[in-house]
Image (cartoon, grey):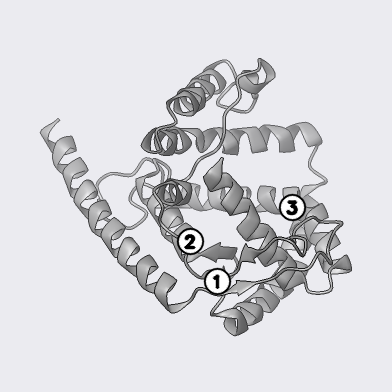
């Protein structure tokens, strides 16, 4: 018990310093880059841009680098991820659905924690209840019993938690392979992976404690990436084929979606 308390204290200290560093970084980013671009409604079909009477704050000081990274990601997607997704679709639909349910279920404890940190008690309880029901009756989360019975919940992550406390999103960035993000959401993702049971020891802070072996963690990460890419395939195809500026469309869609997730 004493060993567990010491471990928890060490981790809390590290998270505190990371949080302070994050706030300082975001404050500097907000001062150095904060421009507004009027978005015309030229992509009505996707509803990603705003009409002329409204505007979306676009903080993209690294646009030149971001566009190059976007092109690289698009190339990797076409030559590697898209063919893998096409092969994955030969897997029977019930198996794909069970895999998706299992992966979603694994994220619920962290979602419950972030809901609690945001003061969303009801949503935290809904996430916890869904996880317990699906992990037991739902055969390790492969069957979404809770949702089928009307128990609904919202997914929450640490980026949303930071945003709910008024921390600005900071500059928009495109990460190699991982895709669109922002300094806020990148920091939130690091936090999530650091405190997540599945990502525990992801920073190699506590070598003696691992809930999952590295190879199993890698398998889960790859499976999750393929599943997410398969879900987004129709949208990605439409944007690439019909958008005049796919980069701007994806950027607008991402920022609007994150803005909505934080405000809801």
Give the SS element for disc 2: loop
Whole-Å distance between the Cαs marked 2 and 1?
9 Å
Left or right: where 28 falls relative to 3: right
Whole-Å distance between the Cαs marked 1 and 3?
24 Å
**Residue labelled with disc 1:** 59
Q: Indicate the quadrant containing the C terminus: top left, top right, bottom left or bottom right.
A: top right
Whole-Å distance between the Cαs marked 3 and 2?
23 Å
Q: How many labels does the image show?
A: 3
Q: Do the residues labelled 2 and 1 touch (CB within 8 Å)?
A: yes
**Residue labelled with disc 3:** 232
Q: Counting other residues with Cα less than 10 Å from the Cα at mark 1, is it few (<14), some (14-19), or many (20 or more)?
A: many
Give the SS element for disc 3: helix
Residue 170, label in figure: none
Give the image location of residue 122, x and y in percent: 47, 23
Q: 249 and 90: which one is in front?
A: 249
Give the image location of residue 203, x and y in percent: 33, 58
């Amino acid at each position: 018990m004493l060993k567990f308390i010491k471990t928890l204290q060490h981790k809390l200290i590290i998270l505190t310093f990371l949080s302070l560093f994050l706030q300082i970084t975001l404050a500097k980013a907000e001062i150095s880059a904060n421009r507004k671009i009027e978005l015309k409604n030229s992509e009505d079909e996707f509803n990603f841009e705003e009409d002329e009477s409204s505007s979306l704050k676009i903080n993209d000081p690294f646009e030149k680098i971001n566009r190059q990274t976007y092109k690289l990601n698009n190339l990797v997607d076409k030559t590697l991820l898209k063919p893998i997704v096409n092969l994955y679709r030969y897997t029977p639909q019930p198996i794909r659905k069970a895999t998706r349910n299992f992966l979603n279920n694994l994220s619920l404890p962290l979602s419950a924690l972030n809901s609690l940190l945001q003061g969303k008690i009801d949503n935290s309880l809904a996430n916890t209840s869904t996880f317990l029901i699906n992990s037991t009756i739902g055969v390790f989360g492969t069957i979404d019993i809770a949702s089928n019975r009307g128990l609904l919940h919202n997914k929450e992550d640490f980026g949303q938690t930071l945003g709910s406390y008024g921390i600005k999103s900071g500059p928009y960035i495109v990460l190699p392979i991982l895709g669109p993000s922002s300094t806020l959401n990148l920091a939130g993702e690091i936090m999530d992976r650091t405190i997540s049971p599945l990502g525990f020891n992801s920073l190699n802070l506590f070598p003696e404690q691992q809930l999952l072996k590295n190879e199993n963690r890698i398998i889960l990460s790859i499976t999750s990436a393929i599943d997410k890419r398969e879900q987004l395939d129709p949208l990605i195809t439409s944007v690439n084929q019909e958008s005049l500026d796919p980069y701007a469309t994806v950027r607008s869609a991402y920022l609007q979606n994150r803005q909505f997730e934080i405000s809801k």
